Image (cartoon, rainbow, N blue to C red):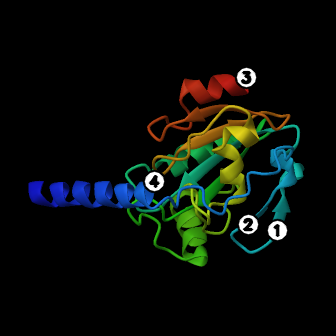
Amino acid sequence: MKYIMIILILVLLSSSFAFAFFGKKDKGLDLTDKSKSIYDYSINLIDGKEQLMEKYKGKKILFVNVASKCGYTPQYQGLQELYEKYNDKIEIIGFPANDFLWQEPAKNDEIKSFCSVNYGVTFPIIEKTVVKKSKDQHPIYTWLSHSDLNGWNDSAPGWNFYKYLVDENGKLIEIFPSKIKPLDSEIVDLLK
């Protein structure tokens, strides 16, 4: 087991080094329109329907990159509880991504079923996407992780269940690492 962990660490380090060395970071991202707000974007829900972000004006929005085979996957339950308790104040949007150790290998229909059957998820889940900084990064995550666009934050998700909180006016107000649970007071206190 020890050797497997060492090999895994070496693979992650070498891929990170290659990524940085060959300069693919942020290549192809559109960072030119600095006037765009979060409400200028849209999402494709997991059932294929397009949803304009302007629908969520007046509510806080918690963006969470999710995965079904992660140690943090049980946070789906906390996200659903948060949504049920505060859905008059917050919208939660799940972004399934296979960016971290291939922990979301499923297809959209399988992800939808997994969320519904195992956690009773009723908050919006979008089509499987990319949240890490790259030319394929979802445009909303480009906005969330580039200070030129959101005003202050350059942090992209470091793992699954990384959370970004946008206020009722579309301003990014806080980010939470994966270990912060959805019902943690750091999040809930911002909803009161």
Q: Circle 3 sits in a helix, a strand or a loop, which is it?
A: loop
Q: Callout 4: few (<14), some (14-19), or many (20+) C-alpha neighbours within 10 Å? A: some
Residue 23 on image: x %, y %: 50, 58
Q: Residue 122 versus residue 41: which sits nearer the camera? A: 41
CB under 8 Å between callouts 1 and 2? yes
Vertically, is 91 above or below 101?
above
Residue 117 on image: x %, y %: 54, 66
Q: Earlier in the sequence, mark 1 or mark 2?
A: 2
Q: CA distance from mark 3 to mark 2?
A: 28 Å
Label 1: which residue? 50
Which quadrant of the rendered structure holds the N terminus? Answer: bottom left
Q: Amino acid at mark 2?
A: Leu
Label 2: which residue? 45
Label 3: which residue? 192
Q: CA distance from mark 4 to mark 3?
A: 26 Å
Quick check: can you spot residue 85? Answer: no
Q: CA distance from mark 1 to mark 4?
A: 26 Å
Residue 131 on image: x %, y %: 58, 57
Quick check: can you spot residue 96? Answer: yes
Q: Callout 3: few (<14), some (14-19), or many (20+) C-alpha neighbours within 10 Å? A: few
Label 4: which residue? 73
Q: Residue at x 83, y 62 (%)?
A: 51
